[in-house]
Image: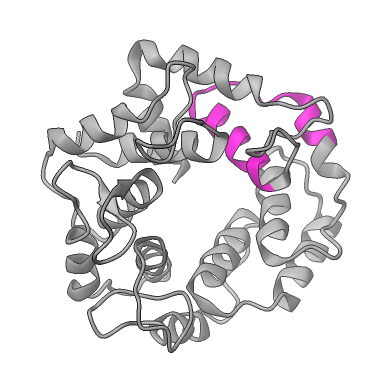
């Protein structure tokens, strides 16, 4: 995903500078990047740091100091533990003892569903470790398939979502499994008339998260969409004057998370 985001940053042209300034402006006094309420947040700090890395910019030292306050992630849920892993490994701030402790915590974190499988696999990759029981992960993901070919987050939920279907495709591909044509067709079918992708079947409007992850997952599955100027135009329309990206047209506030999705979407478009 970071490789795709780097491509996206390269495609921004003159709009890259404002984006970098926007992201740097979201750094709080405590060292983390701000959430939508202006408070430093570990989750948003991952996206802020990844945006800067994608743009070839240095991540401020204050970010490392902020993340080290969380130690080895004691008491964190899987989402935030994966954030600690990503930030500390990207900064080269993990020794052998910490690596073993983080891996132990990952193995003990409850990980039901597609999103959890995606996070656990990504964190293991960040730590340079093999996935814990790949066959078990694949079976857990496949249990979340819906009759229409998409994926819900948990078994028994009938409604597939674009982010979970994309995550399932990425996990399966990363583990060397084929992504079913039905899942590819389901993702491709979420494209709206305006060029963006919707979050679910029947959703009335496209939004940036679904557009970014659908494009990326289709590329990973070896089925990237054909060159589509409308999709590129949709993504670019969501970059605000201040440089950051917002989630969808009615929204009026950008944040680091959606700014990363903007880079990912641009970088996942056909060249």
Is 55 above or below relative to 104?
A: above
Location of residue 70 with respect to 173 vertically, above or below: above
Q: Is residue 98 left or right of residue 176?
A: right
State whether the magenta stretch is mostly helix, strand or loop.
Answer: helix
Q: Residue at x 40, y 48 (%)?
A: 209
Which quadrant: the C terminus? top left
Q: What residue is drawn where x is 36% and y is 23%?
A: 10
- Expressed as whole percent of the image width and height from the top left, the position of residue 256 reads 56, 34
Q: Residue at x 63, y 21 (%)?
A: 24
Residue 257 found in image quarter: top right
Q: Which residue is at a point 62% across and 63% down the rendered structure image?
A: 124
Position of 4 relative to 200 (above/below): above
Q: Is residue 65 left or right of residue 90?
A: right
Side of 28 relative to 150 (left or right): right
Q: Residue 144 versus residue 204: which sits nearer the camera? A: 204
* Residue 113 visible to an observer of this rendering: yes
| Residue 52 is covered by the magenta coloring | yes
Q: Could you say where residue 184 lies in the image, as x and y percent from the top left?
A: 21, 66
Residue 215 visible here = no
Residue 59 lies, in percent from the top left, at 67, 26
Occupied quadrant, residue 234: top left
Please give the range of residues in magenta: 43-65
Instruction: Give the vertical position of 71 relative to 154 (above or below).
Output: above
Please tell me which residue lies in front, 14 or 256.
256
């Amino acid at each position: 995903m970071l490789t795709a985001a780097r491509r996206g940053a390269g495609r921004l042209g003159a709009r890259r500078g404002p984006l970098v300034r926007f992201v740097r402006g979201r750094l709080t006094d405590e060292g983390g990047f701000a959430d939508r309420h202006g408070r430093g947040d570990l989750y948003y700090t991952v996206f802020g740091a990844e945006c800067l890395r994608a743009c070839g910019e240095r991540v401020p030292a204050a970010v490392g100091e902020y993340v080290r306050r969380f130690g080895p992630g004691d008491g964190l849920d899987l989402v935030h533990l994966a954030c600690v892993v990503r930030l500390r490994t990207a900064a080269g701030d993990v020794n052998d003892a910490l690596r073993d402790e983080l891996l132990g915590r990952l193995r003990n974190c409850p990980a039901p569903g597609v999103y959890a499988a995606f996070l656990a696999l990504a964190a293991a990759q960040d730590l340079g470790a093999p996935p814990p029981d790949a066959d078990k992960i694949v079976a857990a993901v496949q249990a979340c398939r819906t009759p229409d070919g998409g994926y819900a987050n948990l078994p028994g939920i009938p409604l597939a979502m674009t982010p979970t279907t994309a995550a399932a495709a990425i996990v399966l591909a990363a583990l060397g499994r084929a992504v079913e044509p039905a899942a590819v067709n389901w993702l491709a079918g979420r494209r709206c008339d305006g060029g963006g992708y919707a979050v679910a079947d029947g959703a009335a409007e496209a939004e940036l998260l679904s557009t970014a992850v659908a494009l990326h997952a289709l590329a990973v599955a070896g089925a990237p969409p054909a060159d589509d100027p409308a999709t590129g135009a949709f993504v670019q329309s969501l970059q605000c004057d201040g440089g950051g990206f917002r989630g969808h047209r009615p929204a009026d506030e950008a944040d680091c998370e959606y700014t990363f999705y903007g880079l990912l979407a641009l970088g996942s478009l056909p060249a």
